[in-house]
Image: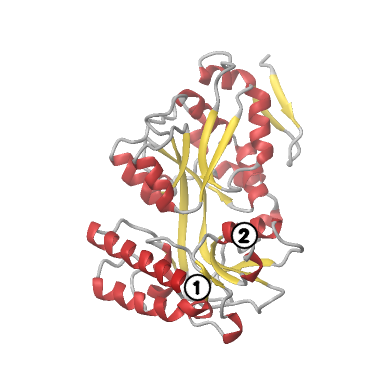
Amino acid sequence: MIPRCLFALRIPLIIVPCMVLLSLLGGPARAEATLRILIWEDFIAPELLQAWTKQTSIPVTLAYFDSDEERDSIIAERKARFDLVVVDGLSSLAFGKRDLFAGISEAEVPNLRHIDSRFSPLCKAGTGVPYLWGTLGLVYRSDKISAPDSWQDLMKPDKALQGHIGMIDDYADTFVPPLLLLGEDINSDDPAVLKSAFEMLKTQLPAVVTYEYPVTYLQTEKGQDLYLAMGYSGDQHILNEYTDGEHWAYTIPEEGSVTWVDCMAIPQNSESPDVARAFINFLNDPANAALNSEALGVATANLSAKALISPEMLADPSVFPRAKSGGALAFHGYRAVTRESLNLRKRITRALVKMHETQ
């Protein structure tokens, strides 16, 4: 009989055969091993990490980033050693092509068989593993403002919201609201189109209080000035942890949005790639994936886990979006832009941040 490790976690009971992990690790865990993960803040359930450490005796250390650009710089320049990194789909594809990530196969990580196949192409095959997915939308203080329903509420806010708007400094996401309002492709490479978006973003500047990720900004002294911001599905739960009361909510504007997929990958300079593969396998046990998804309020890319998620979460449109009032929500996908477009987008976002700092 295979010995089992039992953990009383958020959902009734997670049962994982100990020998499976030991075989993936190539024997008993080394006492000196440590799993180092570069990840968004509050993007993995603490109880899951505790269960992993209790089962394997391998501690986990987390390092946070608050922008895709910051994370990509750390990975590309190899500024630090990590065993696992969480990257967006575009970065997963780009870094995978540059051979910066180690291989991950189903033979090494059997629980990859539970991954929803529709997400697999969005992470670099063989090096990136789909982790969580969601949408870009609006997070807002329901005790301060009425529920927004358009990107116009963010880009051309009422006077009462002057100094209470939050944007995100990102070469892709910053452009989503203006480009959708302009009726343009969110992945446009056209300099004239991007300059039109820039003009709209400049007009919005007086209302903007920050270009920091809302979860990061809310923890600053001026965090309570934030009423409406760009955000990602699931952010409302994290924001509510830092405020009194459940005031933060999330919605998808009527013009539509984009869907995102974050992937897990193992940098080539990882000191413990086998431990990282074992952790990915542990995380993709359906019960563990369901626990993680429920704890974060974010949809998992693990298809088998969906059957273990509560009916309440499955019915939550902020997690699993549905059409509003019988209409159809339009969701766009990210795709790589040209180098010229990327450089122009980055110049525009840097200019916006500098203009904001000096206003």
Residue 92 drawn at (x, y percent): 38, 45
- Which quadrant of the figure contains the N terminus? top right
Residue farthest toward the front in the current orientation of the protein? 358
The amino acid sitting under disc 2 is: Thr
Residue 72 drawn at (x, y percent): 39, 47
Vertical placement of residue 206 versus 41, above or below: below
The answer to whether one can see residue 76 in this image is yes
Nearer the observer: mark 2 or 1; the answer is 2
Give the number of the disc on residue 220. Answer: 2
Which color scheme is applied?
secondary structure
Residue 58 drawn at (x, y percent): 60, 24
The amino acid sitting under disc 1 is: Ala
Left or right: 103 as drawn, with respect to 227: left
Residue matched to label 1: 328
Q: CA distance from mark 2 to mark 1?
A: 38 Å
Local secondary structure at mark 1: loop
**Nearer to us in this view, 127 or 157:** 157
Q: Residues within 10 Å of mark 2 (few under 14, many from 20)?
A: few
Q: Quadrant of residue 19?
A: top right
Left or right: 337 as drawn, with respect to 215: left
Vertical placement of residue 116 versus 317, above or below: above
**Nearer to us in this view, 210 or 314:** 210
